[in-house]
Structure formats: structure tokens, C-alpha cells
Amino acid sequence: MFDFPTLFTLTLFFLMVLFLIWRPHGINESIPPTISAILILLAGIVPLSDVSKILGIVSGASITILSTIVMSIVLDSIGFFRWTAFNLVKLAAGSGVLLYWYINLLCFLMTIFFNNDGSILITTPIIIHIVTILKLKAKQQFPYLLSGALVATASSAPIAVSNLANLIALEIVGLDLNSYVSMMFVPSMIGITTISLLLFYYFRKDIPKRIASIDGKSFDSSSSISHDSLADMNDPPNYPPPHHLPPHHPPHPLPPHHLSHPLPDSVPHLPSASTNNAAEIDMSLFKICMAIVILIRAGLFVGAGFDIPIEWIGIFGALVLIGYRWYRKGIGPYDILKKTPWHIILFAFSIYVVVYALHNIGLTALLVKLLREPLSANYLSASLISGGLLTVMSNLFNNLPSVMIGTFTLAGMGLDQPTLHVAYLANIIGSDIGSLIIPMGTLASLIWMFLLRKNGVRIGWWDCIKVTILVIPIGLIISLLSLYVWVEWLFY
Amino acid sequence: MFMGVFLLISGSFLYLLLKPPVSKNINIQEEFVFPKNPSLDGEGVAGCLTSQPYLR
């Protein structure tokens, strides 16, 4: 039925996905794709002559993501995220509803300014910390945790630079960053807002009306807590707090090193006596770092307008932050070199080789044959079919290989440019938003589940799917329809 | 232009969410970790946020 290359490649692909999700003994996530890629190259399914071409496509995207990871590691090392939990509780002013929206906002912004995986790694411990210290019941914690994770992951859609898969796909279809944003920002923001609102409606009875609040305009020794407003102070959470931490550790356990894909080994440090080095508040340092982050993010789009490769701007931003920290704190770059997940380049390259092999054995040709006619009928079909296909594939095989397969398929269809762009953007919506139905859809979701388990929060796959199966498809369809309306109205 | 404005507004919100709660250089360990008000040591959000919540 199948010839050897087909059988060999399909077997390797499914094994790679299986090991990527399972990760026995916590193996590094780049190992399964790397082994698969080596075997594929040895078997000659992808010729060695294509290696440099593949490297050219994935290296820019990987370096851009690495630079944002480096920036978040530098910021974390100077205590940048340390006050977030405190600030959120203070801003919520005793309202559980306000806290929900602030958490959603934080997760959105962290993904916009850094990237989706980094956002999950930084915000999840913060949210766990908040719901634990507020002594919320498990049922009350779930809305905050789930909505934060879903919003953080979905928020990689609006501006492309927050997600490795988006950047690689962008390279394949030859769309520039500013064109992407102009066509994608509004539809994906409508989708993210829809998801947030639907989640709020779904959880409206579980979100506590009143939570603990912090009184006072600044937090000093005279601050006090309104104990009477605590949500069920006498009814402790249904899971035990992670009391196994040794003294003087950050209040949330660090993720293990093997969970670094494609993530920084970086988590925020909340205020504690243990963080002596970072205990000093330096407002001018904070403000300048914040300005650098915003300027570099804006610089990506300015640079794209002048055809400056975005990875150069990313590298420049990371170097500026490292240099500034060195100047102000006397901390050299060695810790950054050690903590940066350099294997992300190998990871992206290997996944691409495997997907390229699937392309070479005819998988994408098959999809092209099946989908070309219905997809090219009009922009609405292009949007719905492409987004729907990516949603199904992402939830079955994870979104990174899926988005590459989807993009290859579109590139091979010979579509006119407007249809190609609509289908490609729908691909991204399926990959970033549609993939959230099942936790295995994105690596960020898998990391989130792992972080919850490590912190003693018992939320199973089925608990999530019961919610996402209702919320995500609606958000997805609204996003895809918005994309169609927006693009047809303003662009083509 | 649009992205510049968007990132500026978003950055301002992020600044609000992340900024330390005081506006001058200060040693947190002295001022926050060991609050003088003993009621904060045992219970409450402030006590939890500034000390070791799981070790109390």
C-alpha cells in the first residue's frame, strides 16, 4: 500500500509527535524531532542539499524568538516580574471579577511583548500564587488559571512575532510583518475578546464576587487586609499547597530544566527574604528596561518597513538589555548564555525537516488535490476551510508541525496572492486559537498542565476540554468570519 | 504608526501591572518582608505576598 519512504516518514512523524507529548523521563523536547530529522536525512528523503535552505527559513524566526526569551531572562534576573501578583491583587481592590480581567490583560500583554511560551512560564506561577494566597477553592481557582492560559496562548495571533510557528510560516508565504498585522490584528483580537467573554460567562458563578483586598495607596508596614472580604476564609482550597518547598525558596517551584522548550528557564521571583540580590527596588532601572522592551518591540515593525531582518533588531534589543544590566548591576552575560534555550534552533530545524519529508512523500500534494478547489472558491471558503483544517490537525498532532504542513499545502496550491494570504492567516488562527481545544494542541498548553501538576493544582485534561469544547470553536468561527469580513472589506 | 500607538498603550498597561509599588530606591527586605504590623505576619494577602506563604 505504501512505499518505504512514505511508511518510514509517517512512522517517524507519529513517533515524534508521541514522544514530544509524552516526553518519557523528561527528555528535552528537541531530542525526538532531532532523531527523526537525522534518520530522514540519512534515508535521503530530504536531500542534504536542502539543509542550508531549511536553515535559512527557520534560523531568522528562531533567533527572533530566542532574543525575546533572552530579554525575559534578563528582566527576570533583575526582579522585573516580582511584584506582579501583588499588583494584580491590589488593582482588583477586592473584586474577583476585576481580578479575572486583570489576569487576562496580564497574560495578553506578556504574550504581546514576549512570546506565548514565555508568557505561560511567567504568568502561570503568578496566577497560582494569587489564587493560593487568596485561599480560593479549587472551583474558584479554575477560571483564573484556565482563562489566563488560553488568553496567553491565543494572544500570539495578533502580531506574529510572539510565536515561532507564525514566524516560520510568515517566511514561507513571503508576507511581511506589517501586512500581517494590518490584516490579522483586528480579527484575532475579536477572537481573543470573544474567548475571554465566553469564559467569563461560563465561569460567572465560579468567579468569587469578593476576594481579599489590600488597603492603602502604597504597600508599606501600615497596609492592612480586609479580612472580612476574604472568599471563604474558613474553607481552604481542595488541594494541598505545595508545602514541600525548602525554606527560603521562591514560593512557587521552578520548572525543571528539561521543560525548557522553547521556553526560558525563567520564572518570576515574588518578593521574599530569599531574593536578597533582587530585593532592591530600582525604579530608574525598571523604567529604562520597560522603555527598551517597548522600543525594541516597536522597532521590529519599523525595521520590517525598511526590510531590516527582524532577528537583527531582536538581537540588538537583547544585547542592549544585557549591556544595560551589566552597566547598572555589574552582572555579566554568562548567566544568560547558560540559561538561554539554544536548542530552540535545533528544535525548529528538525521539525521543519520532518515536515519537509512529509511534503516530499506527497502528503501536502494529497491535501492540495483535495482542498484546492473548495478553498479557492472564495475568501470565505479559504478562511473557514484553512482554519478548520489547522484546528483539526493541531489538536491531533500539535500546532507547530501542523502549521508548517498547512503552510506548505497552501504554498503548493498555486493560489492567487489574496486567497493565499487569507488562507494563510486562517491557518494561523486555527493554529493559535483552534488548537486550544485539547491541551496537546500547543506546547504552551502542555507546559501549563505540567506547571499546574508541579504546584499541586489538580486540573485534568477533561476538566479543560469540557470548557474549551464549548468556548474555542465559537471563538474560532468568529475569528475566521471576522478575518473574511475584514480582509474583503479593506484589502481585496 | 498603528503598532507604535498600540505598543505604547499596551506598554503603559504592562508598566502598571509590573511596576514595583514604591517610587524610590528602597530595600524591600527591610520594608516589606518583615512588616512591622504583626497582623500581617500571620494572615492576609500582604503577609503572604511579602513573606513565605507556604512556610507559615
Image (cartoon, helix red, strand yellow):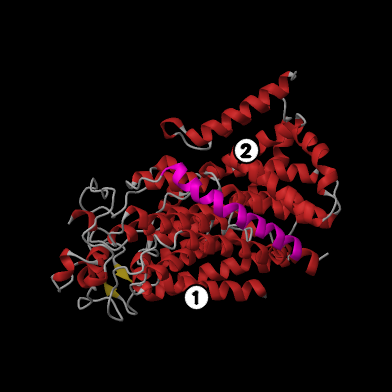
Left or right of B35: which side holds A5? right
Q: Quadrant of the C terminus of chain A?
A: bottom right
Queried whether the magenta region covers residue A468, the answer comes back as yes
Left or right of A306: which side holds B36? left
- Give the crowd class for mark 2: few <14, some 14-19, many >=20 residues within 10 Å: many
Disc 2: which chain? A
The amino acid beneath tag 1 is Ser
Question: What is the total number of numbered labels drawn onto the structure image?
Answer: 2
Disc 1: which chain? B
| Circles 2, 1 touching at the beta carbon (< 8 Å) | no
Q: Residue at x 16, y 64 (%)?
A: B42
Q: Residue at x 73, y 66 (%)?
A: A306
Q: Circle 1 is placed at which residue position?
A: B12
Q: Circle 2 is placed at which residue position?
A: A351
Q: Which residues are magenta?
A: A460-485
Instruction: Please check whether the numbered discs 2 and 1 fall on a single chain.
Output: no
- Give the crowd class for mark 1: few <14, some 14-19, many >=20 residues within 10 Å: some
Out of A130 and A6, give the one closest to the viewer.
A130
